[in-house]
Amino acid sequence: MRVATLLPSATETLFALGVEPVGVSHSCDYPPVARDLPTLTSTAVDHDDRSASDIDAQMRSVDGAVYDLDVDRLAALEPNLVVTQATCDVCAVDASGVREAVASIDSAPEVLTLDPHAFEDVLDDVMRLGEAVDRPDAAEALTDRLRARVDHVREHAADPVAAEGRPRTAVLDWTDPPIRAGHWVRDMVEIAGGDPSFQPDGASEPVAWDGVRAYDPEALVVAPCGFERDRAVDAIADLADRPGWRDLAAVADDRAYAIDGNALFNRPSHRLVDSLEALLACLHPEYAAAPPGERDRVAHVNAGTASMRADGG
């Protein structure tokens, strides 16, 4: 089957199912071979070496669609299936635009629209993708492995929760302005043994800095959308310059982390379970260590300062 995917999370999962897409979005970078595939989307927003506030300003200034789809190139690839999303208009091409574009293609490919909002939705989408690309057995096997790992996280979180309770946890997926991560993140915090009450029960949403200070998280995870770890480290300076930063319990107690949001937390692929395991290590480091493959994606914030140490959590 010839599959075109317009979002990184679907690309990641398709490769895990043994399916190489014929075309991908400009954001698809995992596995690395995805970078060599024909690119079907573009954006006028410049993310390279730009601050969080600059990128936010660019997004707000765009008149019309943030992302463009190369319909001619898509048609030339003659896909049988196009995978898109309806979860977030600022993350990928809008699903309605994709359907309109596909309607003009002679090969008339089917469109699969993914719209996960809860952690369970992400796991279910593995099966949806598998069925859509005729790999149901591979999808079932992958899902079984993922669910076993999720159960393992629940089990490891149970002891510290029983002994110490759930730490007040805040996960931000942007820093200027601060935005608290929504969708599947609330579920992940709960599974990993944190207090999920700070995270919205829905889409990510802006939060006033005074609201962060009032909540006073005991664990702070900063995973800016689309930023790798080193850029997350830079972005966290947006918070460190704000009044009361050093007084936050998470900062004072060395429980603040800058995380590679591009690989962890932001993308609802099968790798979200990797993110869950890394989150467990952040919330309960005495009981769980970050998996070896994720240690280089996590950096501590040095207590009481705006400097960082990239020690892998």
Image: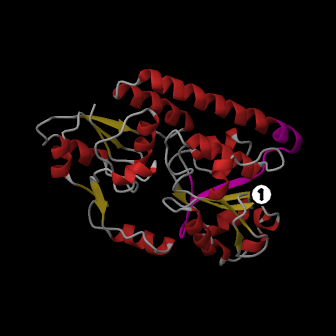
Instruction: Name the residue rendered at 77%, 62% in the picture.
Output: 250
Residue 171, percent from left and from top: 63, 55
The span picked out in magenta is 159-181
- Could you tell whether 179 is left or right of 294 in the image? left
Vertical comparison of 193 with 71: above or below? above
Identify which residue, 92 or 96, lies in the foreground.
92
Identify which residue, 290 or 169, lies in the foreground.
290
Queried whether the magenta region covers residue 172, the answer comes back as yes
Q: Quadrant of residue 311?
A: bottom right
Q: Which residue is mark 1?
A: 218
Q: Which amino acid type is shown beneath numbered disc 1? A: Glu
Confirm whether residue 41 shows in the render. yes
Queried whether the magenta region covers residue 294, the answer comes back as no
Instruction: Name the residue rendered at 59%, 46% in the picture.
Output: 185
Residue 31, percent from left and from top: 46, 48
Vertical comparison of 194 with 59: above or below? above
Vertical comparison of 234 with 6: above or below? below
Q: Quadrant of residue 131?
A: top left
Identify which residue, 30 or 88, lies in the foreground.
30
